Amino acid sequence: MTITNQESGTNVHEIADGIYRINTPVVFENGQGFSFNQYLIDDEAPLLFHTGPRKMFALVREAVASIIKVERLRYISFSHVEADECGSLNEWLAAAPDAVPLCGMVASLVSVNDLADRPAKPIADGEVLSLGTHQVRWFDTPHLPHGWEAGLLLEESTRTLFCGDLFTQGGANNPALTEDDILGPSEAFRQQMDYFSHTANAGAMLERLAATEPAILACMHGSAFKGDGATQLRALAQALSSPVQAKKVTAS
């Protein structure tokens, strides 16, 4: 792990071949901790998934610059329209002249083509985009966990699922990559603040993601998970269908 800003604690950790987790821990006035993660795929056409909030732009840019020249970025992608997902989108577009927003078809139509300083590159459900040695596939996940325009990316060679707000974990000092259960901590967080829309299609969408057998779950808040991602996703589906708090899942 490399600390890129001593004051904020922003750090970078390679979680898979050519895939970097950028993490900024935050402790609020009430003493509770949280974290904001972005993920950079370093390739011929580098991609950043999540921008971070606008006020964190300088920290995230500093971290990205420790890996690649920021000007090389080609795609700025995110799950849905929300400050921590795309709050600094236009700052990134200004810093990387060849970059374009990469988002789902609905997001491009209803929000991004108006909000962004350059037109989005919309990506269809199931469409694959080559970045060079890495390939990413887009999955529409409307209202999972929230947002009509929501979607997720899978990097196919490393089987890394950029899963956005799924498995959100509280705390400021979680390890960058863990093989321990993340469903328990994420369900504990959801018990306090349920951010899921509880769409009737959640189970089917989670099963579709589980069928890709992800080896890494790249979460936006908390640790990334390494192991049997399919089991974690199926357990999440079960937890969402039941009022009873989920039991711990053993990673394999």
Image: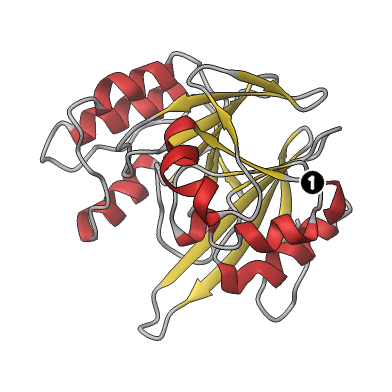
As rendered, which of 116 and 127 lies closer to the eye?
A: 116
Give the labeled residue for mark 1: 73
Measuring 56% from the left and 32% from the top, which residue is drawn there? Answer: 122
Farthest residue toward the left?
Answer: 243
For the residue marked with disc 1, what is the amino acid?
Answer: Leu
Residue 160 visible: no
Give x and y (percent) for residue 131: 77, 28
Instruction: Please tell me whether residue 207 is drawn above or below residue 219 in the rendered image.
Output: above
Crowd class of label 1 (few under 14; some 14 to 19; many from 20; radius 10 Å)? many
Farthest residue toward the bottom?
Answer: 29
Give x and y (percent) for residue 15: 69, 40
Give x and y (percent) for residue 60: 69, 63
Instruction: Please tell me whether residue 156 is drawn above or below residue 235 in the rendered image.
Output: above
As rendered, which of 76 and 247 lies closer to the eye?
A: 76
Instruction: Please tell me whether residue 86 is drawn above or below residue 237 in the rendered image.
Output: below
As rendered, which of 129 and 108 lies closer to the eye?
A: 108
Image quadrant for the N terminus? bottom right
Indicate the secondary structure of the residue bearing disc 1.
loop
Give x and y (percent) for residue 78: 54, 44
